[in-house]
Image (cartoon, rainbow, N blue to C red):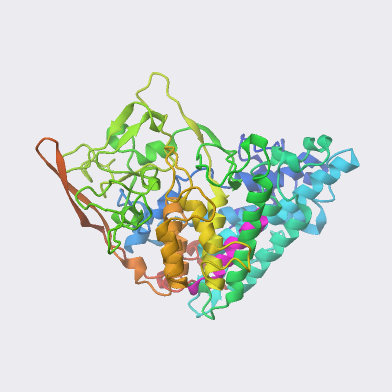
Amino acid sequence: MNKNILLLSALIMLLFGSCEKFLNPYPVGLITGEDLWKHQEDVQGLITRCYDLMSTNYNNNEGAYLDGATDDAVLTSPTNALHKLATGSITTTADPFLTYWDRDYKAIALANLFLKDRRGINTHFMRDAHFNDLVRNRLQGEAFGLRAWYQWDLLQKFGGKGVNGTMLGFPIILEPVDPTAKINLARNTYDECVAQIKADCDSAYQYLPLAYRDFLVKVSGDLLYAGGKYWGRIDGITTRAIKANMYLTWASPRFNPGKDVARWDSAAANAKKVIDFKLNVDGASSVSGGFKPVDYLNWFNPNAPGLLIASRNVSNDDAMERMFYPGGFQGNGVMGATQELVNSFPMANGYPIDDPANRGLYDATKPYNGRDPRFYSTIFYNTAQAKKNNTGAVMYTFENWTGGKDQAGSVSSNSLTNYHIKKFVYMGLNWTDASISRQPHVRFFIRWENMCLAFAEAANQVVGPVDITKYGMSARTAIQYLRERKTQEGANGISPVVPGNPDAYLLEVAAAGKDAFDSLVKNERRLETCFEGLRFFDLRRWSTDLTGLNNPVHGAVIIQVAGTPVTYTYNLNNVVEARSYTSAYLPIPYSEMLRMSNLIQNEGWNGWN
């Protein structure tokens, strides 16, 4: 293992790597490994640093850039490592995922140090015995939960079929590693990694409060060391969400060749626990208006009611706006949405654009008219307007036709697909304003929508779309929650906001049975989570070969036709990029393969052994 992961002295030094703070102070001064345990703030810093290692936005290779290696987006730069991954030209010296392997093991090492011999929980944090118990139990639970969190990240990124034909995960490390020992770790089996993550989640749950909410704290004096001040950290309900996501992948075709239905059941059961919490606990509270599933998701609110766990926020940030806007509006246009993603948005009444009877009234000559409200919150298209706060003055009008200022490829800061991305963009920001308004940006790791999607997919596999007996809610209802939600522009979703009254197409597909509904769920997942770094792994867990991964992706070619009014012709079948994957899995970092002979590489990465 990389020395900066293994050496105890390096672990301690990790605590001093930043001047920023996340809820708890960092330790100060230089200390030896044993001196750490003499200072309670340094012991707390072990856990604090784990949180600080988490991504804080979507502008990285495990966020929006990762969608550029899927059928949802195309990266503009041909030298980007993920572009090279998608086109089959990535090299061992440009591995975009090595940093996450290192990051995850750094965090696991910090958690292991806290948990070793129960030294963390036995540290004396507060003079008052009751307050001391609140702090030490919370930290113990978070240590287990954070270890599960980073283990799950390792499993999702690096788990796969080894060249020996066995489904493998990551090397499980549960102890601080002796820095004098020679390290030559082997990967545990995929199933062993699942069992370890489950065990850590369950251990965390025993120590943690159900959720960090002030209204759940029974004694007001306990709010000094409990409750909402720890919002964003791992709590009890978050561990159920981690398990739901883990089981969902483990149940999927690529990782479940035996078609074990119990795995789907575990995914559904854990997701339903989270859904019930959001509806019946968070939703029953009047604090901050409470959680309402029909409310739109405010990407710039670090305290959004639908959140389960998020990163610390980056205040007054414009990274995503710079990333997604074209050069004509002072952006970098680093990626563009594909035609495949655009086509996946249905019409305003919920019918797909390729409905045989065209009940959504799709007009190929005006392909962006009358679409699902979520489309207008996600995609900037030809003639779309960026309006101040979505209702005010027009800040920018997109010209993606041939000869227009935003034409694909005309400058290095324009998308290659003739689509730009609106998701995560704060519509109150205009760099030409005298006083520029920026908003906090935050990474939403798990939220309400993720659990609805997980439950719908898993419950459908167990009992079909409409059964409400087993789980107390149907898979169809979970999808209805998403289709009826408001958008950031204030528009209502597809379905009338009436319980039990889903839109006609949702009813039709649910009645068609499990397979038809599974396709709908997958499309809803695509729409809800695009540019969040999830589709890369979804496409792999859903498939059993490389066929779907290697389909070319398309964009639009748009011609402006002179006249009054001006019109446009659209060619929506323009191939923008071919894809060439030789493996459905990510590689174990080459540097680790060289360091440890016991590691087995994933299949399809023969040059990385």
Q: Residue at x 65, y 40 (%)?
A: 16
* Residue 330 falls in image quadrant: top left
Magenta highlight range: 238-253
Measured from the top left, where is residue 217 in percent x and y? 78, 41
Residue 575 horizontal side relative to residue 420, left or right: left
Specify the quadrant of the image occupied by residue 472: bottom right
In the depicted view, which residue is nearer to us: 111 or 433?
A: 433
Rendered location of residue 193, percent (x, y): 62, 68
Q: Does 36 sit left or right of 373 as displayed?
A: right
Which residue is rendered at x = 50% and y = 80% of the image? 165
Q: Main secondary structure of the magenta part?
A: helix
Examine the image and state in which quarter residue 167 appears.
bottom right
Q: Nearer the viewer, residue 421 or 466?
A: 466
Q: Is residue 91 above or below residue 290?
A: below
Residue located at (51% from left, 79% from top): 257
Relative image position of residue 182 (x, y in whole percent): 65, 66
Magenta residue check for 485: no
Residue 243 among those drawn in magenta: yes
In the rendered image, the quadrant that contains the N terminus is: bottom right
